[in-house]
Image: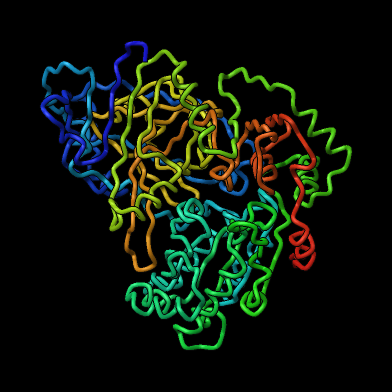
Amino acid sequence: MSGLRSIKRDFSSSSLASSSQDNTDTVQAPKRVFKRTASGLEQRLKDIQAGLDSQKLSQPSAPTSASQSAASVSQKRPPPSNEAPAAKRRQLPSSWTESITPQASIQSRSTATFQKPTKRAPSNERLAPSSSKPKGVFLSDEQTHILKLVEGGQSVFYTGSAGTGKSVLLREIIKSLRKSHSKSLDAIAITASTGIAACNIGGVTVHSFSGIGLGIEDAEHLASKIRKNKKAMARWLRTKVLIIDEVSMVDGNLFDKLARIGSILRERTEPFGGIQLVVTGDFFQLPPVVKGGSQTVFAFEADLWRATVKKTFNLTKVFRQADPEFVDMLNEMRFGTLTQKSINKFRSLAREVRYDDGVAATELFPRREDVEVSNRSRMTNIDAEERIYRASEGGTLVGTEQGAKLLANFMVPSTLSLKVGAQVMLVKNMDETLVNGSMGTIVEFADPATYAANNEDEFIEKPTATGEKKIPHVGVGSKWPVVEFLNRRRLLVQPEVWKVELPNGEIQVSRTQLPLILSWAMSIHKSQGQTLERVKVDLAKVFEKGQAYVALSRATSLEGLQILHFDPKKVQAHPKVVEWSRTLQTIDI
């Protein structure tokens, strides 16, 4: 690192347990924790001002901001209202800015480790939204129609091309179901075919929910195995609604097994024992993983698919891309029916795209190893001080092999190395303009209390995607990255929590880490569901059907997309999926 000092920020409570030869400086954040509410802020105005005066903090200056393109945020945020009341400015209580005396020792190693606070406000703390304010998410008519069917108890499957709001709708479905089953939250089982997809929706894999392990035995043997597992058996009996995301990667034989297991365990003849199913995914994207030379069997080919899923819908309104030409090109690619005009256009995108703000396009790779090499080499080229942030991890499976596999599925890494000048991507929604997928550059590292006083506009109660108001984390003694995003807005980024939670509330694993990843490169698998303004893809490296379509459909525009080695053969659709797609119903409202 060119002799530069490396500073490590550790969220784990055991991070300071070191040998006498592991020389570190330690700084503890305040132990006092406050639950902050809107009424409490007003009652403590005098203390707030006194605290700021005592610290001699400078007056705030509002950061600039610009709205993102309508194509990338129209499904996530409501349009601004001229009649909305002005947001209240938040100021800091004196207790949040009290001085802390560092416990320092002179050591020979030039490494400082910052300890996680003994207690801190929960990272997902929120204020309840005012009932007079609009909700943060607006659904299209076709999305609303599907939501109402689910609320009415119907088992449904819905799909759609990339960018049609499948994930947005799923979050609203989950929110609605949890509200209607508020007295028995374990009645809603949120699952997905892969660990990454499960983590993205706050659920578990369908294998973990069902308790089938690898699931290689027949349904009768698996049901007998589950009966011996009290927790798994209880899940099957208590579940009223089973959600399966990214169903395209669920093998049809597995779908049949699960349907029969539910019937056996719940002693009912209906598939899944009468459990309501909400299934979503895009079969034109990544297919099921097959062993050896086995033939791909899609979930829609399962014997019990039609008996289970009575309503199937195809979403048609595209939100990610606003350009009709680009939408048509992606649809041609999806069905494997590219015209010569579209082929020529895709090939013309091999040109180099230059950006004058210093933020390069995210390069998508099919293999994780290539992603790590690319990001590491870019970081090495930055001549700046490095800060290392280590995650805090917990849960009932931490320390086990299964827990390690679950943790590996989180978008954020256990260890995150950052420098001023590093290109990063936000992987959680912060508010209406900074959302999952927003890209930017680290411009400094700052103490939260000082930053809050100098940037008061960032500490205004801002509605999140769900209409809630997010309260910023405030602490002393820790330095967090300040990121300037493409919309020119700056944000002090602080830790958030990711978790894998069973329907009964058991948290199998959790990780507290900064909601950032290096964004020079990203795997195609992890990019699924993301919206990216700047994308670069080398199609010579893709090796699986659906990868090219997933990668290219992440882009919001042709202007922000660079494609190397475009080959029409790389974008062929599976003929069985094309044939089946003709049976899908569209919603004509």
Please say if 309 is above or below 17: below
The residue depicted at 78 percent of the width and 34 percent of the height is: 346
| Side of 578 relative to 85 (left or right) | right
The residue depicted at 45 percent of the width and 22 percent of the height is: 379
Q: Position of residue 60 (x, y in %)?
A: 36, 24
Q: Quadrant of the C terminus?
A: bottom right
Q: Position of residue 4 (x, y in %)?
A: 32, 13
Q: Quadrant of the N terminus?
A: top left
State the residue in front, 257 or 464. Answer: 257
Can residue 70 be seen here?
no
State the residue in front, 215 or 472. Answer: 215
Please say if 52 is above or below 514: above
The residue depicted at 32 percent of the width and 11 percent of the height is: 3
Q: Position of residue 307 (x, y in %)?
A: 64, 80
Q: How many marks?
A: 0
Q: Of all residues shown, which one is farthest toward the front? A: 292
| Side of 422 relative to 522 (left or right) | left
Q: Position of residue 381 (x, y in %)?
A: 47, 16
The residue depicted at 44 percent of the width and 24 percent of the height is: 442
Q: Quadrant of residue 476?
A: top left
Can residue 513 be seen here?
yes
Q: Quadrant of residue 255?
A: bottom right
| Side of 102 relative to 205 (left or right) | left
| Side of 6 relative to 246 (left or right) | left
Please say if 537 is above or below 158: above
Coloration mode? rainbow
